[in-house]
Amino acid sequence: MIGRSLRALALPCYLASVAPAHSKDISCGQEPSSSSTSITEADKRSLLLKADMLSELAGTDELARQIDATRQEIYQGRGKAAAANDAYLAYFLCLAVKRDASIPEADKAAAVQGYADSVLRTNSLRSSAVQDCDSFASSPDDLTRPAGTPGIPFDQIETERAEAACRLAVGEQTSPRLQYELARALEAGHKSVTEAAHLYRLAADEGFAPAQSNLGLLYENGAGVDQSYQEAVRFYRLASDQGFAPAQFRLALLVEQGHGVEHSDAEIVRLLRLASDQGFTPAQGALGLMYEQGRGVAQSDAEALRLYRLAADKGSTAAREHLDALIASGRGSSP
């Protein structure tokens, strides 16, 4: 075994020595391309050693488990180069078993097929993990969530299930949406707001509006990051400019308070109207108040009543209270 392992230390010699003898029915194909990834010669040597170790297990029940474990290690630790590492490991394992005359032909074929079976298993698992992450942690406000996925309100996230699924999904697929969903799960579970902020930032840097909005809220509250109204305004604006209603609403509140941005009733109304027109319930109620008070718009009890009713009918307690109070004052009519 030691002698067989040492051969992998000399990559060029090892590849040059590969012979098809005793393996007429096994094709390892062409060497994978590493031109578009960060895989290095050192990576290849490491993968050769792993392939050599796996080839030692050809014909045993342990092989499948070790293939799965080795591939899981690859995908957890190599980021964007993981797929290239996976392809090279499959190639090197094929070469290793093909070269070894001591391995029965049936076991050689089984080893190569075992790697292919592992790929099928983990591809299925990744697909399942992504689906579970979306199901357990997507936001109802995220319009990019998959069709048929309703989204989970923040306070209803089953944090342990969501975190487990989203960690697996993020480990297998680089996606701003999945990073955002993992951050939601972490933040909802009060586990690591700092990690959540990091994940939101990764997704925000990719221009993902829901993450920009949530990162803005962390800056506003000083959770997981140093408190900064200026940074909150910056991230809210980035998301607002993409039409993300929650960010438009949060930015309107900061404008109302004069935090990090100059107060302007006209700007408040503009932002609330943008969000309200998308059916965002808090913005509808807040815009109703602007109409009731005549701030930034011409005063209109009728428009205030209309907006309050829209929000109240969707469960807004505050909008219902304002609606009832306006009706009780004699300035509006009951439904």
Image (cartoon, grey):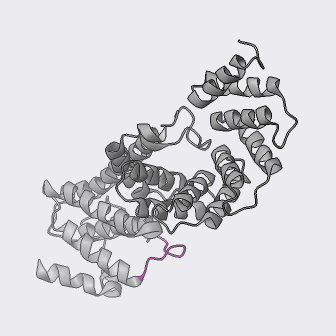
Residue at image coords 66%, 27%: 322
Quadrant of the image occupied by residue 306: top right
Going by the image, does 119 lie left or right of 282? left
Quadrant (top left, top right, bottom left, bottom right) of the N terminus: bottom left
Residue 18 appears in view = no
- Residue in the foreground of this view, choosing between 307 and 145: 307
Q: Residue furthest toward the front?
A: 329
Coordinates of residue 171 in the picture (x, y in percent): 40, 59
Residue at image coords 50%, 53%: 180
The answer to whether residue 120 is above or below residue 198 is above
Q: Which residues are magenta?
A: 33-40
Coordinates of residue 41 in the picture (x, y in percent): 40, 83
Coordinates of residue 166 in the picture (x, y in percent): 40, 50
- Residue in the foreground of this view, choosing between 323 and 127: 323
- Residue in the foreground of this view, choosing between 238 and 273: 273
Residue 142 appears in view = yes
Quadrant (top left, top right, bottom left, bottom right) of the C terminus: top right
Q: How many marks?
A: 0
Coordinates of residue 135 in the picture (x, y in percent): 45, 38
The answer to whether residue 166 is above or below residue 104 is above
State the predominant SS element of the stretch in magenta.
loop
The answer to whether residue 145 is above or below residue 217 is above
Quadrant of the image occupied by residue 104: bottom left
Q: Is residue 135 found inside the magenta-colored segment of the image?
A: no
Residue at image coords 23%, 54%: 110
